[in-house]
Image (cartoon, helix red, strand yellow):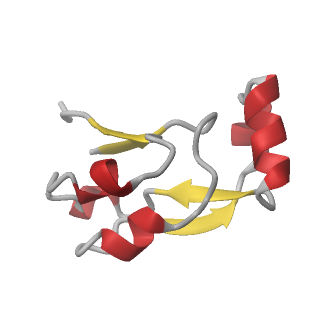
């Protein structure tokens, strides 16, 4: 399952482009997610238009790792689900 570090993601959409399973999409950061950001994360978010990647179809992830290797901010990790 992909996990996105909100303090690192700059919404450049590399994950969207490389994912063969349509797991990701770029969207405006939700208010609840915005409240959890560090100061640096908030500055980064503002500088990049308030949008980040979301794993909207995380259940479709096959853990191929393409998103992890292509993310320029190293904002994505893969974790095992229970």
Quadrant assignment, res 11: bottom right
> Residue 42, relative to residue 72: is it above or below?
above
Q: Position of residue 62 (x, y in %)?
A: 14, 58
Left or right: residue 76 compared with residue 10: left
Give the residue displayed 36% in from the left and 64% down from the top: 57
Residue 32 in sight from this viewpoint: yes
Give the residue displayed 43% in from the left and 40% down from the top: 74
Left or right: residue 11 compared with residue 36: left
Give the residue displayed 43% in from the left and 57% down from the top: 55
**Residue most extreme to the front:** 72
Left or right: residue 65 compared with residue 27: left
> Residue 19, relative to residue 69: is it above or below?
below
Give the residue displayed 73% in from the left and 34% down from the top: 41
Quadrant assignment, res 1: top left
> Residue 12, relative to residue 45: is it above or below?
below
Front-most of residues 10 and 52: 10
Q: Position of residue 46 (x, y in %)?
A: 85, 50
Left or right: residue 48 compared with residue 56: right
Q: Quadrant of the C terminus?
A: top left
Q: Position of residue 20 (x, y in %)?
A: 23, 75
């Amino acid at each position: 399952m992909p996990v996105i570090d909100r303090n690192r993601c700059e919404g450049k959409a590399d994950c969207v482009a490389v994912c063969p399973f349509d797991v990701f999409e770029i969207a405006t950061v939700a208010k609840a997610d915005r409240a959890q950001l560090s100061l640096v994360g908030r500055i980064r978010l503002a500088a990049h238009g308030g949008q980040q990647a979301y794993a909207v179809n995380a259940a479709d992830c096959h853990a191929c790792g393409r998103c992890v290797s292509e993310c320029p901010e190293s904002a994505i990790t893969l974790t095992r689900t229970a």
